[in-house]
């Protein structure tokens, strides 16, 4: 689960930075890289799924999100 959590954090960080750029300058990094097509939609879906994963992950692990430590503590 640590790998899934790390990947989710990275994807969510990229999505958050993209929204920051949209809010500050009106520039959409994802659309600039991929254009407005199916790839942009996939990126947005991955960001949303990452957020959902990070919301339910602590419920599955007794209130903790494990990134580096022992999962069995």
Image: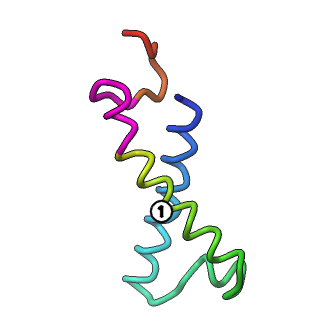
Instruction: Judge from the rendering whether residue 37 lies leftward or rightward of residue 56; answer left or right.
Output: right
Q: How is the image coloured?
A: rainbow
Instruction: Judge from the rendering whether residue 41 lies leftward or rightward of residue 64; answer left or right.
Output: right
Residue 35, image quadrant: bottom right
Q: Residue furthest front?
A: 60
- Expressed as whole percent of the image width and height from the top left, the position of residue 69 reads 45, 17
SS at mark 1?
A: helix
Residue drawn at point x = 55 percent, y = 55 percent = 11
Residue 29, image quadrant: bottom right
Pick the quarter of the image with the C terminus.
top left
- Expressed as whole percent of the image width and height from the top left, the position of residue 49 reads 50, 57
- Expressed as whole percent of the image width and height from the top left, the position of residue 10 reads 54, 49
Instruction: Judge from the rendering whether residue 14 lies leftward or rightward of residue 42; answer left or right.
Output: left
Residue 34, image quadrant: bottom right
Residue drawn at point x = 43 percent, y = 87 percent = 25
Give the residues drawn in magenta, as a range: 56-65
Alpha-carbon neighbours of circle 1 within 10 Å: few (<14), some, or many (≥20)? some
Of residue 68 and residue 52, the one placed in the foreground of this image is: 52
Of residue 31 and residue 1, the one placed in the foreground of this image is: 1
| Magenta region includes residue 42 | no
Of residue 70 and residue 52, the one placed in the foreground of this image is: 52
- Expressed as whole percent of the image width and height from the top left, the position of residue 32 reads 66, 84
Of residue 4 and residue 16, the one placed in the foreground of this image is: 4
Quick check: 22 above or below 16? below
Residue drawn at point x = 37 percent, y = 42 percent = 56
Residue drawn at point x = 45 percent, y = 16 percent = 71
Q: Residue furthest top?
A: 73
Quick check: 73 above or below 46? above
Instruction: Judge from the rendering whether residue 61 lies leftward or rightward of residue 9; answer left or right.
Output: left
Look at mark 1 in the image and give the residue it sits on.
48
* Number of numbered callouts drawn: 1
């Amino acid at each position: 689960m640590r790998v899934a959590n790390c990947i989710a954090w990275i994807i969510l960080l990229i999505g958050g930075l993209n929204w920051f750029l949209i809010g500050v300058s009106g520039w959409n990094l994802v659309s600039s890289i991929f254009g407005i097509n199916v790839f942009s939609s996939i990126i947005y879906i991955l960001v949303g799924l990452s957020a959902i994963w990070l919301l339910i992950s602590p419920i599955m692990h007794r209130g903790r999100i494990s990134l580096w430590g022992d999962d069995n503590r």
